[in-house]
Image: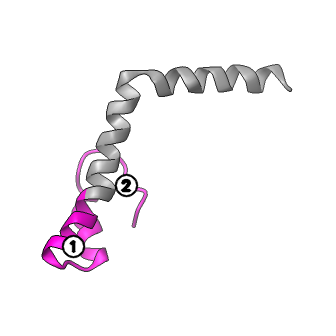
Amino acid sequence: MNLNIIAKFVLLQQLQQSLNFNVAFISFLTTKIYLPLHEMITYGFSMQEAFSKHKQTKGHCFIM
């Protein structure tokens, strides 16, 4: 296995173990995926309406 790949893998593992990464990731999942799905179920929004509402929130939106 290439040493460069191993070094990148170790760095990635350290990043995943850091608190900041976990908080950011959980926050991302909550605002971008959970809330729109929750609103679709609770209020009957269409998928596009629910997800577009949360595009304006903090962070990057990968779901269009």
Q: Give amino acid for label 1.
A: Ile
- Residue 10: x percent and y percent? 64, 20
Q: Which residue is outermost to the front?
A: 41
Q: Residues within 10 Å of mark 2 (few under 14, many from 20)?
A: some
Instruction: Identify the disc placed on residue 41.
Output: 1
Q: Count the numbered circles shown.
A: 2
Residue drawn at (53%, 20%) of the image: 14
Please report the residue visible at 30 percent of the width from the left and 75 percent of the height from the top: 47
Q: Is residue 30 magenta?
A: no
Residue 35 on image: x %, y %: 23, 58
Label placed on residue 21? none
Quadrant including the N terminus:
top right
Secondary-structure class at tag 1: helix
Q: Position of residue 64 (x, y in %)?
A: 39, 67
Point out residue 28 in the picture as x, y percentages from the top left corner.
33, 45
Q: Quadrant of residue 58?
A: top left
* Above or below 39: residue 62: above
Q: Which residue is mark 2?
A: 61
Task: Say which element carries label 2.
Answer: loop
Is 46 positioned to the left or the right of 16 in the image? left
Indicate yes or no whether the magenta region holds residue 36: yes
Amino acid carrying label 2: it is Cys
Give the extent of the magenta segment.
35-64
Labels 1 and 2: the sequence-earlier one: 1
Residue at 81% x, 19% y: name it. 3
